[in-house]
Amino acid sequence: MFFSRINKVIPLLTSALLLFTLSAQAQFFNEHSYKMSKVLEWINTYYVDSVDQENIVQKAIIKVLQDLDPHSAYLTKEEVQKANEPLQGNFEGIGVSFNILEDTIFVISPIPGGPSEKVGVQAGDRIIRVEDENVAGENITNQDVFDLLRGEKGSKVQISVLRRGVAELLDFRITRDKIPIFSLDASYMINNDIGYIKLNRFAATTVEEFENALKGLKKEGAGKLILDLSGNGGGFLDESVKLADHFLEKDRMIVYTQGTNSKKREYIATATGEFEEGKVIVLVDEGSASASEIVAGALQDWDRAIVIGRRTFGKGLVQRPFLLPDGSMIRLTIARYYTPTGRLIQKPYDEGTEAYAKDLITRFEHGEFIYKDSIQFPDSLQYKTLLENRIVYGGGGIMPDLFIPIDTTPNTDYYASLIRKGILNRFVLHYVDQNRDRLERKYKDFEIYMNNFYVSDDIIAELKDFAFQEELEFNQEEFTQSKQDIELLLKAYIARDLWNTSEFYEVYNTSDDMVLKAVDVLENWNTYYTRITSEMKNAAE
């Protein structure tokens, strides 16, 4: 019989059969799945050469899913583990933030409360050995570090570190534990009544992190909020619903999903919102997708927030994971999601996967990131907000109420090379490593640093020399054009390495056009809101 001849690949063939029978009406062995099984049987039995059945089935699955839509996908067992980790909100390891500097694992900072901090590992330590094996100067990669230092909770690993000012290597025996992956990048007060929160994804712990941050900001007097979702590629739909719920009154729809084989499901706000009255700005850009678009779309549809930035990515498809017997998985699109007004945010993908993948490049080339007028929506995609009857658009991302072009002022080749080649980041690691004690004595807290630190000519000279040693030739004209932004990033990176990412953004946002506009709007709310409302109403007439 067929199954006895290919008994070793039964799980893989089952995967292929499942892929071709995913519908409510189909039976497991219908005409199409039988056809597929026969093809695989004949290849296995009669093909001139030996074949890798697993590879054949995997390629078939990938091709079928690619032809369905851009977001249905196949993941191997290993890819499933890597993909789930950031959304689950934790991994198991020793708990350090690191970078690779001169082929050496350089500890940027131990995660507060984590296993490494508990045993005394410090920022600036260089990991030289792991389990008595040398790991310095071995062309080590980030993946190598993960493989060495991550492991099951409760397992132990010994590391030896070199610490500045200490002659001998320091040995630490570390018990691995659950290490949180934070989805909140920053939370701080911009002024006496405006709070700022930046989220980088929608993971299992996102809303909990947001709630804790919001409580802290409200204690400091935040009555207005900037919610920064720029660059946030999404994540769990349920987390985006819970987040939007904090801003909307009870019984207001947040989003609904629907597909041919998936009944309409509505997600409705509850009475548990923690910020239902304060003024809100949502920041978005071309990197904001999926769950970010759910939040921005819901708050825009209910006239609850002013959305500032650039048109979002445009992902409005819902994927459901289906685990396969060998630990691999397919993510199958089962529904589309719609904002409360009925807007479909998914951008078209009828020109194929390649064109879809290049969409952001196409938008950039067409000038969309710089000129608002380059974005044209047909009248058929017009919708009206639910309270003020303002015009909003569907069919391709969330269009902000206030457009902020991307800042191209510092975009010289010299500046781009400093960033792209990692030179600026490596220089800051060197600088902080060599000056950490002096910096910590002089700037005992971040407020002192924020108000008093400036990038001196000596630091700039060191950067130029460092970049030259990294084979980046100095260009005076380009440096002068980009100087202000280089100095800003230097100060922000140093703040990050001395404190954390929140301090990075607190420095960087002092010159960010979207954040500055958000502050201006919140301080002059009535003027902007009246203008936005009247402009969008006039557009409908």
Image (tube, rainbow, N blue to C red):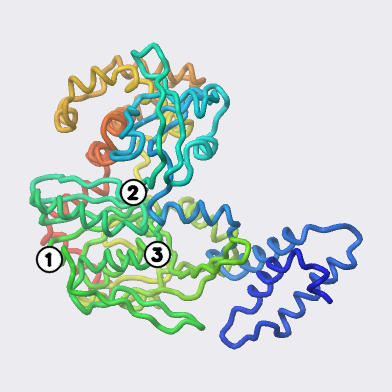
> Percent position (x, y) of residue 473?
48, 20
Per the rendering, the mark at residue 397 is: 3
SS of the residue at dot 3? loop
Per the rendering, the mark at residue 277 is: 1
The three-letter code of the residue at mark 3 reads Gly
Disc 3 to disc 2, how far (Cα)?
26 Å
Query: How many numbered circles are shown?
Result: 3
The image quadrant that residue 11 belongs to is: bottom right
Per the rendering, the mark at residue 182 is: 2
Q: Residues within 10 Å of mark 2 (few under 14, many from 20)?
A: some
Residues at marks 1 and 3 touching, judged by CB atoms closer than 8 Å: no
SS of the residue at dot 2? loop
Left or right, 60 with reference to 349: right
Q: Residues within 10 Å of mark 3 (few under 14, many from 20)?
A: many
> Percent position (x, y) of residue 538?
23, 72
Q: Nearer the viewer, mark 1 or mark 3?
A: 1
Residues at marks 2 and 1 touching, judged by CB atoms closer than 8 Å: no
- Regarding residue 541, the answer to whether it shows in the image is no
The three-letter code of the residue at mark 1 reads Glu
Q: Earlier in the sequence, mark 1 or mark 3?
A: 1
Left or right, 203 with reference to 455: right
Q: Earlier in the sequence, mark 2 or mark 1?
A: 2
Residue displayed at 15% across by 46% down: 189
Query: With respect to residue 165, does 260 lie above or below?
Result: below
Per the rendering, the mark at residue 322 is: none
Task: Between residue 356 and residue 74, name the one nearer to us.
Answer: 74
> Percent position (x, y) of residue 138?
57, 25
The image quadrant that residue 541 belongs to is: bottom left
Task: Between residue 480 and residue 459, name the one nearer to us.
Answer: 459
Left or right, 398 with reference to 223: right
SS of the residue at dot 1? loop
Task: Between residue 416 and residue 88, name the one nearer to us.
Answer: 88
